Structures are given as C-alpha cells and as structure tokens.
Amino acid sequence: MENSTLAIVVPCFNEEAVLPQTNERLASLLNAMINDRQVGEGSYILYVDDGSRDNTWSLIERCGGSHVRGLKLAGNVGHQNALMAGLETARLDADVTVSIDADLQDDINAIPEMIRKFDAGCDIVYGVRRSRQADSFFKRTTAQAFYRFMTNMGAKSVYNHADFRLMSRRAVDALCQYDERNLYLRGLVPLLGYQTDTVYYDRSERQSGKSKYTFGKMLSLAVDGVTSFSVKPLRLIFYLGAVFLLISLAILVYVIVALCKGNGVPGWASLMLSIWFVGGCMLMCLSVLAAYVGRIYTEGKHRPRYHIEKYLK
Ligand code: UDP
Ligand code: MG
C-alpha cells in the first residue's frame, strides 16, 4: 500500500517568538516519520499565517523546504477560520491532516500514534489532554467550567480536547460541507459521525511568546460554541419569565392581604428595587436573544470566511 500523504496544519498569529523552534521540532518529526515509511514522501507542514503583524510570514518563507508550505491569509480571521483555511487547502492533495497550535503546547509525539490509529481505520483521532497542570489556574478553571457548561447546554464536545486532531480526507471533505460562519470546530467534528479514537498526552507550557487567546477571544469562542450548537439559552428565558411571574403573584397576594388588614403597603424602596431588578433581567434576556439574532445576521450574509493572499509550496 502507498503511504498516505500527511499535512500538519499549523495556524499562526504573531508567532515569531516560537516559530523557529516549532518548525525545527515538527520538521524533524516529519522527517523521521517519512524515513520510517509511516507517511509518504509528499507529506508536509502547512503554516497558515492568520494576518500576523510581526515577522511570522517572513519566518515561514525562510522555513521553506520540500516539506514546508505556507498559506498567507489576507487578514486576521481568527484561529478557527485560519484552521479551516488550512484544512480546505490541505485536502486538495493530502490523504490525512493533523491540526496543531503553533506554540507546541500539544505533544507532537502523539502524532505518530494518531497516524497508527488512522492506518487502523479511524477517520478522526482526538488529541486529549491527560492533565492541565501546565495551564494557569485561571485558564484551567475557565476552560473546565466552559466544557461543563457546554455539556449542560446539550452541545456535544470531547472533554479536554481542543484543536489537536487528526482527520482523514473524507472527514475534512465532510467538514467543508458545513457552511457556517460562526465556526466552532470542536463541536462540529463530533457531528461528522465517522469512526473516532482518542490519543492522550500531557499538555506542556507555551514554548515562547504570549497566548493569542485574550479573554475577549475566549469569551467569544464560548458564545459561538453555545449559540451554534444549542437553543437551550432561549428556553431558559422562558423559565426565568415563569419564575418572575410567580414572584409577582406572591407579591400580589401579599399586597391584597396587607390591604385587607387595613395596613398600607410600604412603597418606594421595594418599587425601585423591583423595577431595576426586572429591568436588568429583561435586558439580559434580550442580550441572549440578540446573540442569536446577530448570528442569523452574519450567517445570512454568507460572506467568505477568509481570503488567501499567497500560497507558498
Ligand atoms: N491563532 C490564530 N489566530 C488568532 C489567534 C490565535 O491563528 O486570531 C493561533 C495561534 O497562533 C496558535 C493557536 O491559534 O497557533 C492557539 O492560540 P494560543 O496558543 O495563543 O491559545 P491558547 O493555547 O492560549 O488557548
Ligand atoms: Mg496555546
């Protein structure tokens, strides 16, 4: 059997600090895999420059070799879109892809094991973190709270798996049929239904440079994740409304009883409090609605997810 062509897809945003080290390690791993005949001669690493404003692209150009390619996007479109750009490009000539972050927090030595599972017939292999000791306390707790929240909201996702995964060409082809703009890949991939397996690894610290996922970006990924996989928040608004209605009925009973007893009902403070409380809750509910409406708006426009400026092979 011909060995499969592997493409390792690496989205990079302002990663000049870590890229030389990343390339050295990935290239030597890939060479070893080619020499062991685990993957074909034509295998390559595909760096996707997500509109970096530093020297990332010139470093990618300098990495150039027979097994390194670069895809330069015309602007910063975010990690998920950049990854999608890489996968859509790689599926044209690769039999199998592995996506991995540029900062080498994910253990690259899990890749040969992923390939073994692919050879055994799996279309999707998830890289799952055995522990999160290397993450900061804040990152660890927010990430875990997020996975729980997603599960409670009814959106299927693999616990402690981010975007380190192997996908066969037909799995990537299937993924490309999902035409949505609000991409949340780790939620979409389990929907494909192909045979999956898992490889466990220890997550290390970022090798160099700073996290490109600011708190704002993390939050927007979380909101994308929930809104594109679940309408439960909309249903929760109904229950909140029902609770409020019950509270108002209880207050009504209280007022009637007080009036029947000939007592006045003390007014101003409780009135102000409830107006502000109910007003606040209504605005929050409106914002949940707005999150969905806003997404209908962006989905409806069908704008392209990214534009390619250069493809270096
Ligand atoms: N990234 C990207 N575009 C962005 C933000 C991040 O392509 O707008 C890439 C980044 O270069 C890295 C990966 O996404 O390869 C994950 O980012 P990072 O390691 O900073 O996130 P963290 O591990 O802190 O969640
Ligand atoms: Mg990282």
Image: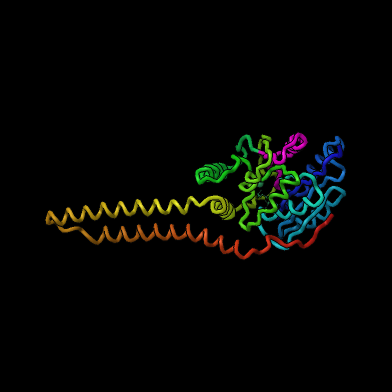
Q: What is the basis of the colouring in this image?
A: rainbow
Q: Nearer the viewer, residue 295 or 275?
A: 295
For the N terminus, the image quarter is top right
Q: Nearer the viewer, residue 84 or 264?
A: 84
Where is residue 132 shown, x and y percent of the image? 60, 38
Verify whether residue 118 appears in magenta. yes
The count of marks equals 0
Q: Residue at x 47, y 52 (%)?
A: 233
Relative placement, left or right, of 226 versus 33 is left
Residue 215 at least partly seen: no
Task: Give the farthest residue toward the bottom.
Answer: 301
Q: Nearer the viewer, residue 133 or 261?
A: 261
For the C terminus, the image quarter is bottom right
Q: Nearer the viewer, residue 100 or 176?
A: 176
Where is residue 55 shown, x and y percent of the image? 76, 57
Where is residue 137 shown, x and y percent of the image? 55, 41
Relative placement, left or right, of 22 versus 292 is right
Relative placement, left or right, of 245 versus 176 is left
Verify whether residue 174 appears in magenta. no
Q: Residue at x 78, y 56 (%)?
A: 71
The quadrant in which residue 113 appears is top right
Residue 262 at least partly seen: yes
Q: Residue at x 73, y 51 (%)?
A: 87
Q: Residue at x 62, y 65 (%)?
A: 301
Task: Give the farthest residue toward the left.
Answer: 262
Where is residue 308 shown, x and y percent of the image? 75, 61
Query: From the viewer's perspective, is residue 310 above or below residue 151?
Result: below
Q: Which residues lie in the magenta part?
A: 100-127
